Image (cartoon, rainbow, N blue to C red):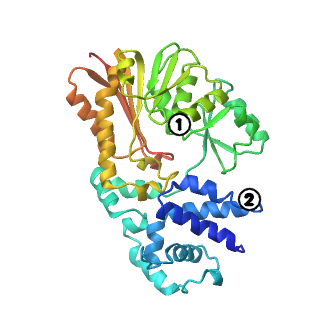
Amino acid sequence: MKLHKNIVQAVIDGLEEIFGKGAQADYIVKKQIKLDRRWGSRDRKFIAESLYDLVRWWRWYLAIGAINLQDEQLYQKVFGVYLHEKGLEIPSWLEIPALDSEAVKEAKHRLEKDTQFQASIPDWLHEIGKKELGEIWDREINVLNQEAQVVLRANTLKTTKSKLMTLLENEGIEMELIPGIKDGVALAKRRELSSLKAFTEGLFEVQDASSQRVAPFSKVKSGQIVIDACAGAGGKTLHLAAQMENEGKLYAFDVEDFKLKELRKRSKRAGCKISRPHLLTDTTIEEFKAKADVLLLDAPCSGLGVLRRKPDTKWKLTPEKLEEYKSVQHHLLNSYPSMLKVGGTLVYATCSILPSENELQIARFLNENPGKYELEEEQKVLPSEGFDGFYMARLRKLAN
């Protein structure tokens, strides 16, 4: 593949945005592939795959290329190592020192059994992972460096999974069934979906298989009052609405209004009539006190279970940020359930694989609220099972 200068520059500039300015990788990838209308699908694919690979294996490329983070040519040199590892020629106009292939080979051999470098993660994260997950940590973090499959959820407010599959097959899309996921299908190959008629008509949502477990796990029913207290852009909200068959009241709370605007747009496309986006304020909890039959707390977390889709998370997360997430989780568990009726259902979920954010938070909550809640069921989904890492706990409220 001949690398044109503007394509290479798009990758290098993207790296600087992500690592130098702290921008979100998925946003930057979408931005960089649209810089030049003359680029074909092959060019855009190269830019996207290169950026995600470089973010995913950032520490590995730095190490085997012996590159210092303060190097003035940091991003050019890392990209040069990437090209070397992919067997592609490094353009002379990139103006970086020639790589010593033997030195690279020696470095790879030296680091091949060192998890921090092999899995390309920060030292502190490796230490916490080992402490909390023990012998399975190395397996899970290595699995999280693989590219995630694209998974769709058939919107049962408008169609069935079998009908959706037929429509998509007619568009030339190959799919795989997912055992245990009633409405989900995985794409055999990645492709652009937003231009499909089935998407514009709201027949499906893009939602990972593990995320699709949460709404059925909550056991919501038609006609109930349900609160999705950390709704974001509403992926789980829309799934809850489908489980409720568009009957009842479904309140979607978030502290960021732009996410609720996106939810309104998605709800309209999906034919969801019961979602009620609500900006969370200081008075919201009191306003909804003892009103909900089901409360979903999809709590803010480290996001370590979704590194396949958001690999830059491991570079943006810090020990201090992790502790902050745990503090927020504890606060949510001890304040938001007042919105539940006695006899109601509390569902706590995270996309983390760390026990300190999951089962240990629930154990602490139960210990601090003796006799008030009963744990009915919990599920831990590990990335090695094929999709995102997730945790879910369902509790019954016994008393105020």
Q: Secondary structure at mark 1?
A: helix
Going from N to C along the chain, the mark reached first, 1 or 2, is 2
Circle number at residue 41: 2
Q: In the image, residue 308 lies at what x, y percent?
A: 50, 53
Q: Amino acid at mark 2?
A: Ser
Residue 355 in sight in this render: no
Q: Report the front residue among 267 and 394.
A: 267
Q: In the image, residue 262 lies at what x, y percent?
A: 58, 35
Q: Quadrant for residue 186, please give it.
A: top right
Q: What is the distance, in whole Å, between disc 1 and disc 2 at their CAs?
A: 30 Å
Q: Residue at x 57, y 77 (%)?
A: 84
Q: Residue at x 51, y 47 (%)?
A: 386
Q: Amino acid at mark 1?
A: Lys
- 212 vs 356, left or right, is right
Dots 1, 2 in contact, CB < 8 A: no
**In this view, 346 is above or below 24:** above
Q: Residue at x 68, y 31 (%)?
A: 202
User: Badge 1 is on which residue?
Assistant: 259
